[in-house]
Image (tube, helix red, strand yellow):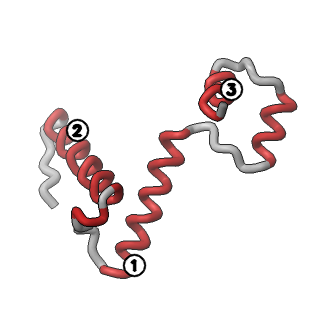
C-alpha cells in the first residue's frame, strides 16, 4: 500500500486531499532518502559514542550501509579520477 501511494504521488495520480492527509502524518514520499537518512542518523549516534566511523561487521545492517557508502564513493572517484583514500 505504501509503495503504491508513493508511486501514485510521483505519477501525479494521488488526490490533493490524500497528499495532504499523508503529509499531515509525516508520510515519507522518498523511501530511499528515508532509509539513507535513517542509517546516517545511526552512524552519527555511533560516532558520538566511539569518536570514529569504523563500524564493526557485528553491527550488521549499519556496517553494510557504511561499506556500501565507501564503495560507492571510491567508484565515483575512480570515474572522476580523484583520490579518496582518506
Q: Where the N terminus falls, by quadrant?
A: top right
Q: Where the C terminus falls, by quadrant?
A: bottom left
User: Which residue corresponds to the image point at 29% horizontal and 49% vertical from the top-left?
Assistant: 69
User: Which residue corresponds to the image point at 76% horizontal and 23% vertical from the top-left?
Assistant: 14
Q: Earlier in the sequence, mark 1 or mark 3?
A: 3
Q: Earlier in the sequence, mark 1 or mark 2?
A: 1
Q: Quadrant of residue 53?
A: bottom left
Q: Residues within 10 Å of mark 3 (few under 14, many from 20)?
A: some
User: Which residue corresponds to the image point at 34% horizontal and 59% vertical from the top-left?
Assistant: 62
Label 1 vs label 3: CA separation? 37 Å
Q: Is residue 13 left or right of residue 6?
A: right
The disc placed on residue 5 is: none
Q: Is residue 81 above or below residue 52?
A: above
Q: Residue tagged by mark 2? A: 76
Count of residue discs: 3
Label 2 vs label 3: CA separation? 31 Å
Q: Considering the numbered disc 2 on the image, is that residue within a helix, a strand or a loop? A: helix
Q: Residue tagged by mark 1? A: 48
Q: Is residue 13 above or below residue 70?
A: above
Q: Considering the numbered disc 3 on the image, is that residue within a helix, a strand or a loop? A: helix
Q: Position of residue 84 (x, y in %)?
A: 16, 52
Q: Position of residue 22 (x, y in %)?
A: 77, 40
Q: Position of residue 68 (x, y in %)?
A: 27, 47
For the residues carrying marks 2 and 3, which lies nearer the camera in this image? 3
Q: Are marks 2 and 3 in contact (CB under 8 Å)?
A: no
The disc placed on residue 9 is: 3
Amino acid at each position: 500500500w505504501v509503495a503504491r501511494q508513493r508511486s501514485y504521488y510521483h505519477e501525479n495520480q494521488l488526490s490533493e486531499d490524500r497528499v495532504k492527509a499523508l503529509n499531515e502524518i509525516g508520510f515519507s514520499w522518498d523511501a530511499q532518502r528515508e532509509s539513507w537518512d535513517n542509517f546516517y542518523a545511526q552512524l552519527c549516534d555511533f560516532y558520538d559514542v566511539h569518536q570514529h566511523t569504523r563500524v564493526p561487521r557485528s553491527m550488521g545492517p549499519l556496517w553494510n550501509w557504511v561499506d556500501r557508502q565507501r564503495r560507492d564513493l571510491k567508484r565515483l572517484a575512480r570515474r572522476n579520477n580523484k583520490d579518496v583514500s582518506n
